[in-house]
Amino acid sequence: MNYADQTPYSDPGVHAGLFDALPSDIAGLTAVIRNLVIHYRGGGIEFTGDRYQEINHRWVSAMLTTDQRRNGAALAVPRQPFDRIVGCCRDYTLMTVSALRHKGIPARSRIGFSSYFADGFNHDHVVVEYWNGERWVMVDAQLDPGPHWKFDPQDMVPGWFRSAAEVWLGYRSGELDGDDFGVDPALPIKGGWFIRNYVFFQLAHLQGDELLLWDSWGAMTGSLDGADLELADEIATLLVAADNGDDAASGVLAARYAADPRLRPGDQILQLSPAGDPPVTVDLNRRVVVP
């Protein structure tokens, strides 16, 4: 795909004009994004009810509608933390990707695991990559740059973040312990099954379906029992090859994604809930919950 084009998820819709005034430099742009979004678990505020449900906005246009209804001001005007859009790493990333694409800068979201939020554990995470004319630059839009990080969040060197495909292949080879990768070390949402699902998230995001991290479809499972491990192996191997500049692998991935209904979301997906609410089916075309 052309990463300078908006997808249905990144498209700001009627709010596109709000991006015109935003900075084009990464430092300035990500500062604005952090003024718009607050993490539902890591922001220091406990959100409930309709405010908590903002994590399911899914589309940038919906996020901006909520922001403008609540704040009604240019995006760079300071928001109080409580008045920001409740979201997660995926939303910081997608909003940044949307703004970059609006300015004609190729950008994409990357799914994987970060090693920098806790010692000895790798949290599931989503970061930005943008093309600077010579290379893909990795950015963690959620992080406020500063000396408290051992790396530059706006030009991350390899290793601090690893793609889901890299981690899956490391897990399969026995080099990595699956229990070191997941949502939180104290929660059961981690391990091999979780890493495997994230391989399919990684593929979907790279193909322009920038889904919520609690969506489920096709090849995804809640355990490795009966799961098609070879399918994940094949996709992960192709993803790593594509990341290393193999254009043929990128072409194969696009063709596989288009042809295999297990790999793509289709018209409807199952939306799970981090809060433990009952799952719901979402019609992605009509953008509604199916009764």
Image: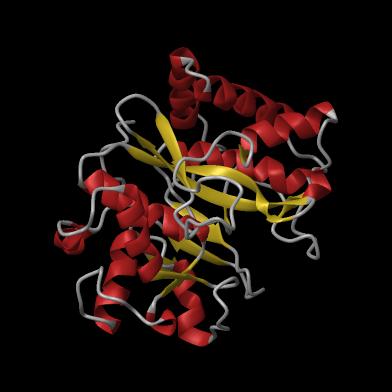
User: Where, quadrant-wise, is the N terminus in this rendering?
Assistant: top left
Does residue 280 lie above or below 138 as drawn?
A: below
- In this rendered view, identify the residue nearer to me: 219 or 143: 143
Left or right position of 171 against 57: right
Instruction: Quadrant for residue 65, please give it.
Output: bottom left
Residue 63 point in image, percent of width and height: 34, 68
Question: Residue sitting at 79 percent across and 30 percent down?
Answer: 172
Residue 92 point in image, percent of width and height: 43, 59
Does residue 125 lie above or below 38 as drawn?
A: above
Left or right position of 144 against 101: right
- In this rendered view, identify the residue nearer to me: 274 or 286: 274
Left or right position of 179 against 182: right
- In this rendered view, identify the residue nearer to me: 237 or 105: 105
Residue 30 point in image, percent of width and height: 37, 56
Residue 233 point in image, percent of width and height: 69, 27
Instruction: Quadrant for residue 118, please give it.
Output: bottom right
- In this rendered view, identify the residue nearer to me: 84 or 152: 152
Does residue 240 lie above or below 208 as drawn?
A: above
Question: Residue sitting at 42 percent across and 45 percent down?
Answer: 209
Does residue 99 lie above or below 260 as drawn?
A: below
The chosen color scheme is: secondary structure
Which residue ends up furthest to the front in the rendered image?
A: 147
Which residue ends up furthest to the bottom in the rendered image?
A: 49
Judge whether residue 56 can be spotted in this image.
yes
Q: How many marks?
A: 0
Judge whether residue 8 can be spotted in this image.
no
Left or right position of 10 against 232: left
